[in-house]
Amino acid sequence: MGWEWLADPGYWAPRLLFQRALAAIYVVAFLGAALQFRPLIGERGLLPVPRFTRRVPFRRAPSLFHWRYSDQLFAGVAWTGVVISAALVLGLFDHTPVWATMLAWLVPWLLYQSIVNVGQIWYSFGWESLLLEAGFLAIFLGPADTAPPVLVLWLLRWVLFRLEFGAGLIKMRGDACWRDLTCLYHHHETQPMPGPLSWHFHHLPKPLHKVEAAASHFTQLVVPFALFAPQPAASAAALLMILTQLWLVASGNFSWLNFLTIAIAVSVVDIIPAPVPELARPPVWQHALVIGVTVLVAVLSYRPARNLVSREQVMNTSFDRLHLVNTYGAFGSVTKVRHEVVIEATDDPAPDEHTVWREYEFKGKPGDPRRRPPQFAPYHLRLDWLMWFAALSTRYAESWLPGLAEKLLSADPGTLKLLRRDPFDGRRPAYLRARLYRYRFTTPRERRETGAWWVREPRGPALPTTKLGPHGAVVAVD
């Protein structure tokens, strides 16, 4: 049987660049898990893994932590993921046997699957599923000294199509401002975590904002179909998507979503100027396995594809427990007004109207109006991101915000490491409260006169004034 049509040496460089970029994103993902898990989902975290695994069975959330959990084991899983992924970045498995390369890619996928499936609300966003879906397909791409399997490359295009087309459809079906091209009048200011250039993007002329929105619609609703066209049309479509994603990278912090989208798009581009080395033919068993995976993905794609054409389209949803084929999308509605939850505390034993309340400063989310929004992506600040949702509605934070107050009142060291600044230098405050503020970017004139990036106005309490009770529980005092 002739298997030559199943492998294409011409995609050697795109395959290699995709693998390197994906492995680097794995490093970032595992590093973030290792550095943030204890205060969020650790044994004494805000939403502990052991509590979750007692409530949710393995069949609903497959994870090795169903068999055993300890903070030491989680740390071992996360750091093992960092090491294996770094080895993949360095190309240490480029010339190993096909089975060994596949095993090397299987390990981070299994480990990160175990983390995501017990990560609860902290790991509930589309970039987690996207990493697992792309990571699953990467297992079957083979080492650098074999010809890339064509079917896997086409499956990556199918991922990219759903990612972009789903995002475009959710916008057109959602907020009316996408249809009249005015959403970007607000988005750069109200997005979850603005970046260093977001202030400048917000102050672009309104006609240019409309051009941004129109370009987004074109890239997400028209261009994706060209991914399945002959070359060079497919490459041109992918390059246009890469350009759009770079614009998003510059304008805000969206974890590794944009970076991974770029990596997947690179796998489509066949005009990368790189000499193709002499490549071995993939073994027959790899071809057979790739065909089986293609059939599996085709079957699992039915529900995500049906979701794309549904008037009740949902976004960022997994239709299987292993996140093999997912649906994506973002910002179907755009917040027009920005609110922020500002957490304050005092060591005054009897607070009154003269009490000085000092703020906790987060690493990424807006706080001090004079602080320029920082760049963190592709690294993901999970607590900062969820604080944006807490400002939208306390309903989004009812499972963890009171626990955060308790951790801050007890000066929990792990929780304090998630913050940029603890105003009490590790000491326990006497009382804590959270207030809701309306934030907006300064105008260019206000920026020149004050040096501030934000203007904020108080809107009311987000959490009542609290203190630690005799048994360590949070007690409201007003």
Image: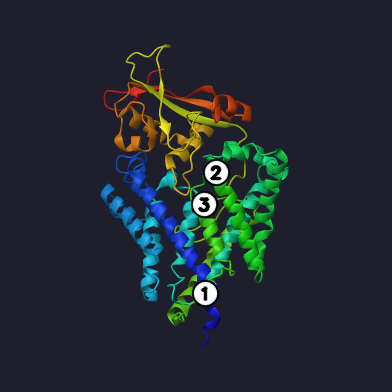
Task: Please state the horizontal and vertical placement of residue 286, each as a whole percent of the image.
Answer: 44, 77
Task: Please state the horizontal and vertical placement of residue 259, each as a whole percent of the image.
Answer: 51, 54
Q: Which label's residue is closer to the chain start, 2 or 3?
A: 2
Q: Which mark is residue 321?
A: none
Q: Nearer the viewer, residue 201 or 476?
A: 201
Label 2 or label 1, whichever lies nearer to me, is: 1
Seen at 54% across and 66% down, the residue is 267
Q: Give the amino acid type for the residue marked by disc 3 in the picture.
A: Leu
Count of residue discs? 3
- The image quadrant of residue 100 is bottom left
The residue sitting at the front extreme is 448
Q: Circle 3 sits on which residue? A: 257
Q: Circle 1 sits on which residue? A: 275
Query: Label 3: few (<14), some or many (≥20) within 10 Å?
Result: many
Whether residue 68 is visible, yes or no, is yes
Seen at 30% across and 23% down, the residue is 469
Task: Please state the horizontal and vertical placement of residue 187, each as a whole percent of the image.
Answer: 61, 39
Q: Circle 2 sits on which residue? A: 252
The answer to whether residue 213 is left or right of residue 419 is: right
Seen at 62% across and 66% down, the residue is 235
Q: Nearer the viewer, residue 72 or 209?
A: 209
